[in-house]
Amino acid sequence: RKEVEQDPGPFNVPEGATVAFNCTYSNSASQSFFWYRQDCRKEPKLLMSVYSSGNEDGRFTAQLNRASQYISLLIRDSKLSDSATYLCVVPLGGNKLVFGAGTILRVKS
Amino acid sequence: DTEVTQTPKHLVMGMTNKKSLKCEQHMGHRAMYWYKQKAKKPPELMFVYSYEKLSINESVPSRFSPECPNSSLLNLHLHALQPEDSALYLCASSQGQGAPAGELFFGEGSRLTVL
C-alpha cells in the first residue's frame, strides 16, 4: 500500500457546488495531516492543517478519520478560483513529509 | 508574495555544466528542504537540513550536492546532470523542532532544463 493515496480526478464541478476529496494514509503513527493547494506552474501553498478530529476555515473543512486512516477536504460553494491541484501531505517523522499525487479540481461557470 | 526566495527562476544548462540553485529565507526557520517536481507529479523530497545539518538525503545521485552555509541559505550544486533531471526544483522551509512538521513555506521554484 502506498504511504499516501489520492484520487487524481479531475473533479469537474459547477460553480456553487460542494465537492469532497479523500486521502488515505498507511502510517498509523502519523498525528498531523495537511492539505496543500498548487496552481498550475506555481509552488504548493498550505491550505489547512488537521491535528485531531477536524478543522474548518470558511468554505473549507478538513476531517480526520483515524480508524479508517483517511483525511478529507470538503469545499462548499465552489468558486472558479478554487480550480487547482489539492495535495495531501503526511509527515513520517524527522521532517520527512510524503505528498500524495494530488487531486485536480476544475470549477466551471 | 513568497517569503522563500529562489534564484534563478529559470536555468538552462548542458550536461557538462556546473551551476547552482540558491534559496533564502528570513523567517528564522531552522529546517530547509529541496524538492524536485516533474510535470503532473507531486513534489519528491530530495534533501532536508535541520539546524544547518543534513538530516535527510533521499538517495539522491551525487550529481546533486546540497549546501547550507547558514540558517537562512540553502544551495543546490548541479554537475553533470542528465536531461531527465529537467524539472521544477522547489525549496521550502519550516520552523523546525517543536513546530508542526508539515507546515512548509515554498519558494516559487527554479525551473531547470538540461540539454
Image (spheres, coloured by chain):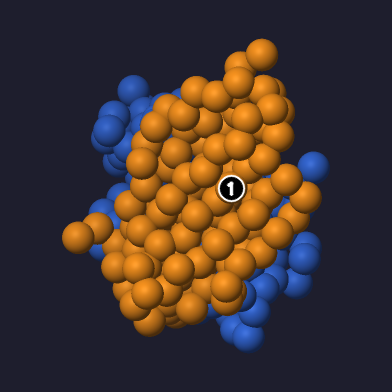
Q: Residue furthest left?
A: A1
Q: Is residue B102 left or right of residue A55?
A: left
Which residue is at the front of the view, A35 or A78? A78
Colour chain B appears in: blue
* Vertical comparison of B103 with A35: above or below: below
Can residue A87 be seen in the rendering of this structure?
yes
Task: Give the amino acid at mark 1.
Answer: Leu
The residue singled out by tag 1 in the image is A74
Where is residue B64? Give x, y as percent.
36, 52
Say which chain is orange. A
Which residue is at the front of the view, B108 or A37? A37
Q: Is residue A58 left or right of residue A99?
A: right
Q: Residue furthest front?
A: A17
State the residue at coordinates (30%, 62%): A3
State the residue at coordinates (67%, 23%): A15
Query: Circle 1 — which element?
Result: strand
Where is residue A19? Give x, y as percent.
55, 38
Where is residue B95? Give x, y as percent.
67, 73
